[in-house]
Image (cartoon, coloured by chain):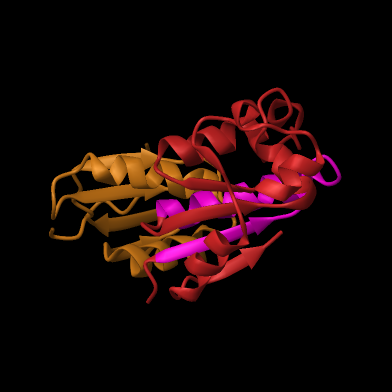
Chain colours: A red, B orange
Amino acid sequence: MSSTFCVTITECKTNGDKATLGFVVANAALGSEKDTMVFLSADGVWAAVKGEVDKIDEGEPFAPLQELVEKFTTNGGKILVCSPCMKKRRITEDMLVPGASPAGGAALVEWLANGSPSVGY
Amino acid sequence: MAGFPRHWDFDEVYDSLDRGCGDFIIDLRAVMRELAPGATLMIASRDAGAPLEIPAWCRLTGHRLLDVAPPFYLVRKMET
């Protein structure tokens, strides 16, 4: 059984439900002792942007997205944010939440090529 | 807390109410990490997914599911 897990998220402002569910599952993976990485691309990058992530709250039974993201990072989860997707939206590194880092496709490919299962939202 | 099997012996109780999926699992890990290896935890979960979720979590983490009486689950923490 793999000791790692990956969740890819491509929506946030366009579909807060998907971003929320992605982080709920990421927390399930982390809570199940999997070294977990969330890869944000396309519109999903907004989930790692200060002042934007706090705008997403799908309501009960889901916690606000900011709370889910913070719980993920403070428990050791990694967030990688597609750097060209950031650039397209004029998002700079200093705008990212703590624990999130810009990265390119190679970082995602390396994580998956090492045998990590993944699920996409 | 009432309703759990009276013959169960446990060191700690975690009541997750009706929270489910990752919201529940990430906090369950934190609770389990505070326990000594071999300690037993009684989980109370009224989430509809718990009967499948908790056994799966035990298989993933190596903790042992000792007994089940929904909404109660008795788990022994893995020895190191």
Front position in the image: A14 or A39: A39
Q: Does residue A14 appear left or right of residue B19 in this picture?
A: right
Front position in the image: B46 or A63: A63
Residue farthest along the right direction in this orientation: A14
Q: Does residue B15 appear left or right of residue B40 in this picture?
A: right
Vertical side of B64 occupied by B71: above or below: above
Q: Is residue A116 magenta?
A: no
Q: Position of residue A100 (x, y in %)?
A: 54, 39
Residue at 56% across, 68% down: A109
Vertical side of A67 occupied by B63: above or below: below
Front position in the image: B57 or A119: A119
Q: Is residue A45 visible?
A: yes
Q: Within the image, what quadrant is residue B12 found in?
A: top left
Q: Is residue A23 magenta?
A: yes
Q: Magenta region: which residues? A: A4-31
Q: Within the image, what quadrant is residue A51 found in?
A: top right
Q: Position of residue B51 (x, y in %)?
A: 49, 63
Front position in the image: A58 or A22: A22
Q: Within the image, what quadrant is residue A10 found in?
A: bottom right
Q: Does residue A22 appear left or right of residue A57 in this picture?
A: left
| Quadrant that contains the N terminus of chain B | top left
| Quadrant that contains the C terminus of chain B | bottom left
Q: Position of residue B47 (x, y in %)?
A: 56, 51
Q: Does residue A103 appear left or right of residue B39 in this picture?
A: right
Q: Position of residue B20 (x, y in %)?
A: 56, 49
Residue at 69% across, 31% down: A53
Q: Is residue B3 visible?
A: no
Residue farthest along the top direction in this orientation: A51
